[in-house]
Image (spheres, rainbow, N blue to C red):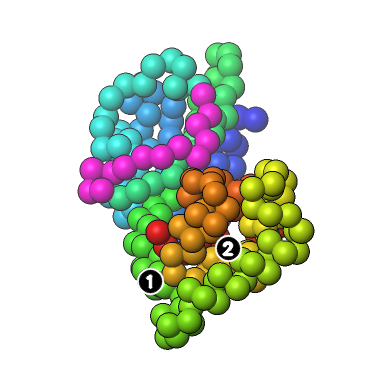
Amino acid sequence: MTRAEAFEFLDRTARGIAEMFGSSCETLVHDMGDPKHPILSIYNGHVSGRTVGSTMDILGTAKELDMTALTTDFVNLYATTPSGQQIKSSTFHIIQEGKDGYNLALGINFDYTSLVYANRILVDLMNAEADLQSAMWQGGDSRLADIFDECIAAVGKPVSSLTKKDRMKVIALLDQKNAFSFRKSVPFVSKRLQVSRYTVYKYLGELAEQGGGNADEPGEL
C-alpha cells in the first residue's frame, strides 16, 4: 500500500466514523512520520478547535513524542482538553518501512462531557429518600419485623444457630420481600441477625453478583 492509498483509506475511515458517531466525535489523520505529527485531515474539529496543519495534540500541547509513542496504538484512553472537555481517545497506526516508508495514524476523540452532566441529572432524578410505605404508615417498623420473623421461620433455626449460608438465605428472602426498601432496614436487620451493617451490605453484594438480589441500593442507614 502506497502512502497515498494509506491516507485515502484512513481519511475515508475518519470521515465515516465522524458521521456515524456525530458531532461529539472528532476524527483525524496524523502524519506520524513527522516528529511534530501535523494533522493531514480532520472532521468535527470543533471538539478540540484544531484544523488541518495543526501540530497541537488533544491535550493542547505541541510536544514531540518519543519513538515508542510514535509507533504505538493507544486505545480508549482518558484525556482532558484545555477547555475542560472529557475525552476518550484512541490512535491507530499504518506504518510502512523502507525508502518510501510512512507512518500515518487515525485519531478518534470522543467528547463525553455532556454525558457526564446527563448522568448526574439521571442520578438526581432516580434518588429517593425513603420507601413510601414506611414513611406513610407508623406500622412500617412492625411490618419489617414481621417480614424478618417470616424469613427466620422459613430457615427454621434460631438466629444464634445460623451459619453464614443460613444468614445469606435470610438476606435473600428479605430481599425478595423488598424488606430493604424500608427506612433503616439495614441497621434493623444487622441488629436482629447479630452481625455488622457492613456484613449485611456484603451479603447483599454477594447476592447481586450471584444474580440473586433484587435491591441495588439497600435502605438508608
Image spot of residue 134 (x, y percent): 46, 78
Residue pointed to by mark 2: 215
**Which residue sits at x=43%, y=82%?**
138
- Report the amino acid beneath label 1: Glu
Image spot of residue 172 (x, y percent): 67, 59
Q: Is 121 rendered above or below residue 21?
A: below
Image spot of residue 70 (x, y percent): 45, 22
Name the side, left or right, on which 57 lies relative to 159: left
Q: Give the residue at the far bottom of this rendering.
A: 136
SS at mark 2 in the image: loop
**Which residue sits at x=51%, y=53%?**
190
Name the side, left or right, on which 175 lies relative to 138: right
- Report the amino acid beneath label 2: Ala
- The circle drawn on residue 129 is 1
Do labels 1 and 2 touch, CB within 8 Å? no
Closest to the observer: 62 or 195?
195
Q: Is 130 rendered above or below residue 117?
A: below
**Which residue sits at x=43%, y=30%?**
31
Q: Is 209 rendered above or below residue 142?
A: above
Quarter of the view holding residue 5: top right
Q: Which residues are magenta?
A: 72-84
